[in-house]
Image (tube, helix red, strand yellow):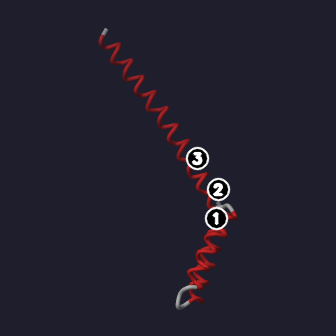
Amino acid sequence: MFLDSELYNVDKAHKDYAIVKRRTDYMQTRAKRRARLLVGKPAVLLSIFAVGAFKGATTSNPKAKRKIAFMSFARTVFYQLIS
């Protein structure tokens, strides 16, 4: 009698673990997809470029900072295209 209830509890715990694991995998995939879509929006890309250009315009060595801003913008666009 006690053994049956313990086996039932163990089986229920395994099923609950499997459900939680599936939900976790789904939510992790969903979060990654949403982050990728957020970074890929034109407004976000433009704001990244604008912040880099502003930093480049306000420093003592603006040419190098603009180059860095452009490269980070290009790298972000490239990674969005390949993923």
Q: Which mark is first along the chain, 3 or 1?
A: 3
- Label 3, label 2: how far apart the Cα atoms are: 11 Å
Q: Amino acid at mark 2?
A: Leu
- Apparent side of residue 28 relative to residue 70 in the rendered image (left or right): left
**Residue at the image position 66 percent from the left and 61 percent from the top:** 40
Q: Quadrant of residue 82?
A: bottom right
Kindly identify which residue carries mark 3: 30
Residue lying furthest left = 2
- Label 1, label 3: how far apart the Cα atoms are: 19 Å
Query: Which part of the image, by quadrant, shows the N terminus?
Result: top left
Q: Secondary structure at mark 3?
A: helix
Residue 72 in the image, given as x and y percentages of width and height: 59, 74
Q: Which mark is first along the chain, 2 or 3?
A: 3
* Residue 4, above or below 34: above
Q: Which callout, 1 or 3, points to the residue nearer the camera?
A: 1
Q: Secondary structure at mark 1?
A: helix
**How many numbered circles are shown?**
3
Camera-side residue of 60 and 77: 60
Kindly identify which residue carries mark 2: 37
Q: Which callout, 2 or 1, points to the residue nearer the camera?
A: 1
Camera-side residue of 67 and 29: 67
Q: Residues within 10 Å of mark 2 (few under 14, many from 20)?
A: few
* Residue 46, above or below 1: below
Residue lying furthest top = 1
**Residue at the image position 49 percent from the left and 32 percent from the top:** 19
Q: Amino acid at mark 1?
A: Val
- Apparent side of residue 16 relative to residue 62 in the rendered image (left or right): left
Residue 22 in the image, given as x and y percentages of width and height: 52, 37
Kindly identify which residue carries mark 1: 44
**Residue at the image position 52 percent from the left and 37 percent from the top:** 23
